[in-house]
Image (tube, rainbow, N blue to C red):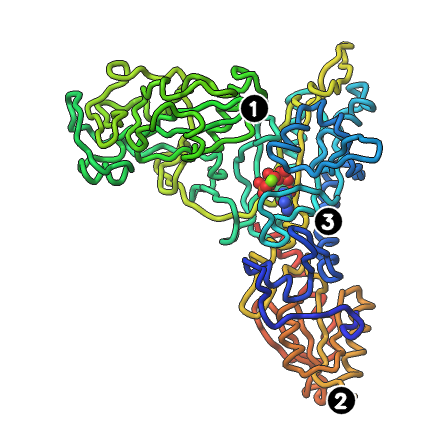
Amino acid sequence: MRLSQMLFVTLREDPAEAEIPSHKLLLRAGYMRRIGSGVFSYLPLLWRVLQKVSQIVREEMNAAGAQECLLNQLQPSELWKESGRWETYTKAEGIMFALTDRQGRELGLGPTHEEVITAIARDMIRSYRQLPLNLYQIQTKFRDEIRPRFGLMRGREFIMKDAYSFDADEAGMKESYRKMHDAYHNILRRCGLKFRAVDADSGAIGGSGSQEFMVLADAGEDEVLYTEDGQYAANVEKAISLPAAVASSPYKKFEKLDTPNTPTIASLSELLKCSPTLILKNVLYQVTYDNGMNVLVLVSIRGDQDVNEVKLQNELSKLASEYGGSAVIGLKVPSEEDQQQWAAKPLPLGYIAPDLADSYIQKTKNLATKFLRMVDKTAVELKNFVTGSNESGYHVAGANWGKQYELPKLIVDVRKAMVGERAVHDPKQTLQSARGIEIGHIFQLGTKYSKAMGATYTNEQGEEMPLVMGCYGIGVSRLAQAAVEQSYDKDGIIWPVAIAPYQVIVTIPNINDNDQVSAAEVIYSELTKAGVEALLDDRDERAGVKFKDADLVGIPYRIVTGRSIQQGKVEVVKRASRETAEISIHEVVPTIKRWIDEAMNGDKNNQ
Ligand code: ATP
Ligand code: MG
């Protein structure tokens, strides 16, 4: 392709709207345009990248035995009502764009396709002979994200590959899952990315086991905890660890302490010269269920630990039916305003004890009259601990479960694992932390959707059984930007060869020099003939501008037909390492071909 004929517009300045390097670079280099909040147009260069990523995804999915299809994006509300997700997806999480057609029927714009695929499976899969089955598609998804940001990283319209497997039983599903796990490794490796597969929370989508594929980059929104030995890696939302040992308590008898101005663990521990491991803190949350019911939750946890709100939400979801609901739609620390809605009297904030009286809760519509009390596992073992007194300015010390305080019946793991803590699989290993961009997520769904929507098959014994499902997503557009986030320098993008929009750029420093032009034309046409994807910078621009643009756009190899063509030579430059060499014109095509080949196969041997 000739640059003179392309829509090729680069910006010298960073666009004000862009927050992270990859977002800035893709805008500056003319890969995309922002059209609205979280909505981007993919311009020709980016479209080539996206098609390359899609093709790698497609090849690996096909190799794993999955079949490509294309499902509808307009999804009737009935399907989502069957699965029970209409309310949460349109209201609570609000992630689904919903609309009403001219006949007054409700529709959603597909944020994901479990409902559609399960409806198809229900209609078309009758017998165990049709199993296992895995269907996938590569398609635009719509999600009304609360905070669209970082360009393609969190868009409201983005490209996803989603796959859904159907098996006869749990063991079959695990095998389908394993195949996808391996396919994801191949995809990310072939795309030239540094990544890690981590244990993940299954979230609203439901099901049992799941893993995320994280592309490692400082700007990643997720925190990954892992051990050096490579045996453990998990999203912090899911991670487990061994907590620090508890200090021995100097408080042998139960006593009330005058502790003015100590509403935080840090201030209290400082005043008392007491280890935070000996302090029991009682954190107040307010949970809202999908039936509108609110419950005040008191979580007792060690002072040196923090509540992992994802784990807490999972625990609260399990209790939904006790409050007449089926899902959690909100979880927060109640603000002053919230407290005014229900508190019978001002709460002793910062000094709350595990037995804070239920009489603090005024009878209010849609509010449980009692605190839901739970204790984190690691706080159960505390002896002679320090905690609040339910009176501002005072704490108690030397307290014990079963004596001063009744141990809550709900003993849960809601503790946030922290960097530096010992690993569960081997206490000699400590948890390290890294930032990651979630590129893929694979789930063992089980029968959640097939049961809810009646998708069954007949087994060998003639019995009707629910299909056992898995689902597997990859953010194709997010992946393209993540590749940039992982690989750039001060001058621009450095694409991995496998997904670069073009492999080579032939730059003519001076288009008024006929020798330079004709040498470039010959090389360009030979490269093209040899199947190399080449750009020809034949614009009437200064050489410096062309070099800057080539660096910015990030094409892996550059060929310059400069002065040395008088000696039958051209300059070749590797974008990533900036290695430069002068080689004879005849060697250009085979050299470039060899480099491309080495880079693509080298990626294969990399990880
Ligand atoms: P996240 O936690 O980042 O919101 P998710 O858990 O909602 O992701 P899935 O529903 O598992 O994501 O979707 C599969 C993949 O689609 C994700 O792993 C991610 O790569 C991509 N993805 C999800 N939401 C977006 C988005 N708003 N913009 C771009 N890509 C996205
Ligand atoms: Mg999401």
Q: Quadrant of residue 225?
A: top left
Does the image show residue 446?
Answer: yes
Q: Amino acid at mark 3?
A: Ser
Q: Earlier in the sequence, mark 1 or mark 2?
A: 1
- Reading the image, the residue beneath label 2 is 513
Q: Quadrant of residue 463?
A: top right
Dot 3 lies on which element? Answer: helix
Tag 1 and tag 2, C-beta contact below 8 Å: no
Q: Which residue is drawn at the image coordinates 32% and 22% (left, top)? A: 354
Q: Quadrant of residue 99?
A: top right
Q: Earlier in the sequence, mark 1 or mark 3?
A: 3
Q: Which residue is drawn at the image coordinates 69% and 60% (left, top)? A: 33
Looking at the rendering, in which quadrant would you find the N terminus? bottom right
Q: Which residue is drawn at the image coordinates 19% and 28% (left, top)? A: 249
Residue 223 position within the rendered picture, expressed as x and y whole percent measured from the top left: 48, 44
Q: Amino acid at mark 1?
A: Gly
Residue 550 position within the rendered picture, expressed as x and y whole percent measured from the top left: 66, 72
Q: Report, in whole angstroms, how far the alpha carbon at label 1 lies from the one at label 2.
A: 75 Å
Q: Report, in whole angstroms, how far the alpha carbon at label 3 lies from the one at label 2.
A: 40 Å
Q: Earlier in the sequence, mark 3 or mark 2?
A: 3
- Reading the image, the residue beneath label 3 is 54
Dot 1 lies on which element? Answer: loop
Residue 278 position within the rendered picture, expressed as x and y whole percent measured from the top left: 25, 30
- Reading the image, the residue beneath label 1 is 292
In the image, taking residue 538 as reference, residue 578 lies left or right, namely left
Q: Nearer the viewer, mark 1 or mark 3?
A: 1
Q: Amino acid at mark 2?
A: Asp
Dot 2 lies on which element? Answer: loop
**Where 139 sits versus 406, above or below?**
below
